[in-house]
Amino acid sequence: MANNTSTRTLYRLEGVAPTVEAMFETLDMARLSRAAAALDFPDRLGVPALLVTGSFEQPVASWCGEIYRTTGCQVSRPVNRSAGLLLLAVDGEVYAIGYDQGFRLVPDRFKDRRFGLSFASRRVNPGKIRDLVSHTPGGGRTDITLVPGGASVWSLGIQEHAQIVRRLGGHLEGVELTISRDNPAKVSSAEGGVGLRMRLGVDGPDLVADIRSIASVLREEAPIPELEFIEHVVPIKEAGLVSRLEDALDDLLGGESERTITVGVPADRWDDYTDARAFEIRINSDAAGAPTDDFSLPYVLHRARAQRRGRRFVALRDGTVTLYRHERATKPDIIWSSNVLRWIEAEVALDSRRFFLMDEGWYEIDREYLRTVRSHVERLITSSPSVDLPAWVLGEKEGQYNESVPAQRPGYICLDRDNVQTTLHRGNGVEICDLLSPDNTLIMVKRAKGSDALSHLFSQALVAVQTLRNSPEGRERFASKVAAARRGRDLPEDFRPSRVVFAILLKDGTELTPDTLFPFSQVTLVQSARTLAEWGIQVEVVGIAAIQPFPSRAGIRRHVA
């Protein structure tokens, strides 16, 4: 039986009117000619649509000449790759789907470069991320992480303020699609970057319905809290600011700019980059530079410096980079061509602000750092904690509070100042936690008057978790401490923690919120939480409620019990 869905990559095009005529005008005639393309105007979908079909042919495969030189055998085999491109307008938006090599016909300059990623940040389960591609501005570094079974986004080590997520894939959550209609129990997945790769309906009405469901998610829903940091990094659109940045980059290109300008592979062309065997660059010249085996930044900068001031940026924007699948770099070997600017990354300062150029888009760096830290803190401070802690009587010392908890909350164990000595941690040893919850969550308690006390608390958690993860001696001695404690119990064999809770009482009992937590503490908290998440440890931050003292201890305990 034929499948009702197939895995395709869907693109959304910007600045294209929802008419067949406008769709046709977006196409590159030279590429259509290379593919010997034919046009159709399907009406089965019930929406304006244009279908392009063709093939990329190479009379003799690039390896045939090498085979002859190696073996003496004369071989002549052609290469023929089919190409299909469907353009369709749904509810005023234009979309494109490539079939086989048809994705090469999708016009790059019209692609909405945030389309797929924006959908993924709204509907991919943050606890079941299967692949993530992140880019570190300024170094040309791209990190690709694959976890076939799925993992929490925070366990992947993403640095919100220092890296830009370029692609995100994982399990889908609750989208009304053809695949879920036909088989509600089937787990579907999606991969979002420039395009959105997922299973889409094959029949015309099903495909259109799926596109409408995707558009509804983007139009009506906010990003999932754990993934909203992805949306913080968006290109700057203000025309005046973009113009100033382009002028600043033009000046930068006229000097010694090797430290602030680097190479960056376009986000949707990593496969083409790895397949390429020759690169040809042409900048404001009828003749291209000699083919090289990689993108040559020195050549680009040399050609830029040769342009007059005010024309350097334009020269890169209008220049071309052509990728070939063979070192001979002939026309039949062309993989893809783009402007030079898509391959350039640069950092530019205007006054006290820093900006970054990547894939032809400008981003602001420092402002996003503060926003992402704040966003992470908001997620960590939970209003529905996994632990149940009693109120703290103002005037009570930290040790007194910790010692009082087990009497008020059965199953909790006080381990305050009951340190664990190991070969590595001699002397005072390691304080693993102040309290241990019934489900063996490590609880770190602190009454904080300033950021220094909280910095110590967060560091304590890192050392404690490291000890339990990496030291059999530490685990054994901690288990002995738990068993010997008042109201103690036996820990599971070879116990390792899975959750850490920072329980904080701010001075004078102020409610703990992102606004009241000390600014420097927010930074150190986020750094510690990220490290713990990389180790597979869930982190919560809870504020401890405060109450005024009563005349007698009995009265106090009756009040908080």
Image: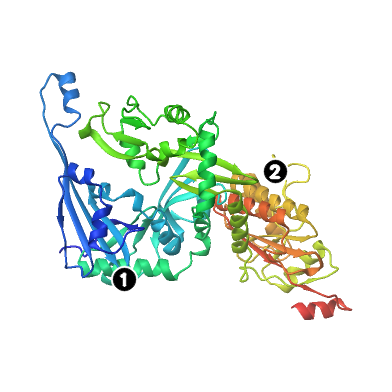
Question: Which amino acid, mark 2?
Answer: Thr
Residue sitting nearer the eye, 409 or 503: 503
The tag earlier along the polypeptide, 2 or 1, is: 1
Residue sitting nearer the eye, 198 or 332: 332
Residue sitting nearer the eye, 79 or 343: 343
Q: Residue at x 16, y 27 (%)?
A: 64
* Residue 153 horizontal/vertical position (percent): 49, 55
Q: Residue at x 46, y 41 (%)?
A: 142
At mark 1, the secondary structure is loop
Residue designated by label 1: 184
Marks counted in the figure total 2
- The residues bearing labels 2 and 1 have C-alpha atoms spaced at a distance of 53 Å
Q: Residue at x 82, y 68 (%)?
A: 508
**Above-or-below relation of 359 to 514:** above
* Left or right: 488 in relation to 557: left
Q: Quadrant of residue 112?
A: bottom left
* Residue 447 horizontal/vertical position (percent): 78, 62
Residue sitting nearer the eye, 549 or 334: 334
Q: Quadrant of the C terminus?
A: bottom right
- Indicate which disc residue 513 carries: none
* Residue 526 horizontal/vertical position (percent): 63, 54
* Tags 2 and 1 touching, CB below 8 Å: no
* Residue 47 horizontal/vertical position (percent): 23, 68
Q: Residues within 10 Å of mark 2 (few under 14, many from 20)?
A: some
- Indicate which disc residue 422 carries: 2
Question: Which amino acid, mark 1?
Answer: Pro
